[in-house]
Image (tube, rainbow, N blue to C red):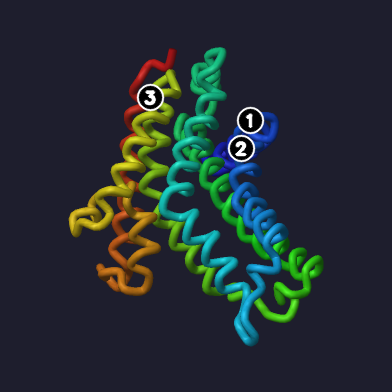
Amino acid sequence: MTAITYYFANTQNEMAKLRRTFAFWLTLISALVIPLLFFIVYAVKHAELAPAEGVNPWTKFMANQVENSIPFFVPMFIVLITSLIIQVEHKATGLKQLFVQPVPKWSVYFGKLSVVLVTIVFTYVVFLTAIIGLGYLLGILFSELQFVNYQPHYLKYVKMLSLSFVASLGIVGIQFWMSFRFKNFIIPITVGMCLVITGLIVSQAPESIYFPYAYNVLSLSLGDQQPLLLGLSKVTVFSCACFILTAGVGYWDISKRNIK
């Protein structure tokens, strides 16, 4: 088998294992909880929330959900899901069994990392799909809400969520390394949550551009006004650089350790 074949085989195995864990259900719950809450609120208060004549109801409906999710819930979800996915292997010496297999260590490490990234992308897709699907359902059930008479601004929110994903890459790299490094999953979760809260606090400071846990807030608050570097937003460049650095250093650290 070639190195690439090992990588894809490991990734497929990790995806199959994920479907049998709580991490998979956490992914679905996290993606659906906010759209369902908004669905309930709109269903109960449909008369009060009916838009004025000529106003697209999707603007408020989608903006409230996306903008309330990105700054805090997205980073917190990444902290939880990354720790839970790796915790599955920490149980019953799973990591040791993975690393003693006759396969390249890098294919194990980066196969796991790829699963984390795919899981996060899947959550974004389910989240946006649920918002749109439940919005149309509200429009069918309560005609005064006008959802079936207007079109959602698809591209605007796909762009916002895509920028949020890229802004999250730095957090993914850091949390993935910590989750591999510490067998007690409470450590990466506690550290990650503290850093997410810190990111919210420091996000107004100019120096927050150097703090990866503030990048989701910055991707939303700055929007198209983000400072540029090499023709790209600094948030994008710094987040990708942080991800590449921590993924590389994390693999080097893990490959040199004796996994017990």
- Residue shown at the point (65%, 49%) measured from the top left: 32
SS for dot 1: helix
Alpha-carbon neighbours of circle 2 within 10 Å: few (<14), some, or many (≥20)? Answer: some
Looking at the image, the residue that sits furthest to the front is 48
- Look at mark 2 in the image and give the residue it sits on: 26
Return the disc, 3 or 2, that comes first in the chain's sequence.
Answer: 2
Mark-to-mark CA distance, 3 and 2: 19 Å
Examine the image and state in which quarter residue 102 appears.
top right
Task: Please give the name of the residue rendered at 72% of the width and 59% of the height, measured from the top-left corner.
Answer: 43
Mark 1–mark 3 Cα distance, whole angstroms, equals 19 Å
**How far is mark 1 from mark 2, CA to CA?**
6 Å
What crowding class fits label 1: few (fewer than 14 Cα within 10 Å), some (14-19), or many (20 or more)? few
Disc 2 is placed on an element classified as: helix
Do the residues bearing badges 1 and 2 touch, measured as CB atoms within 8 Å? yes
95 lies above or below 38: above
Q: For residue 251, which quarter of the picture? A: top left
Q: How far from the left and from the top, in percent, is residue 154?
A: 60, 73
Numbered badge on residue 22: 1
Q: Which amino acid does label 2 sit on?
A: Leu
Looking at the image, which residue is at 72% across and 62% down? 133
Disc 3 packing (10 Å; few <14; some 14–19; many ≥20): some
Residue 66 coordinates in the image, percent (x, y): 52, 60
Helix, strand or loop status at disc 3 = helix
Q: Nearer the viewer, residue 200 or 252?
A: 200
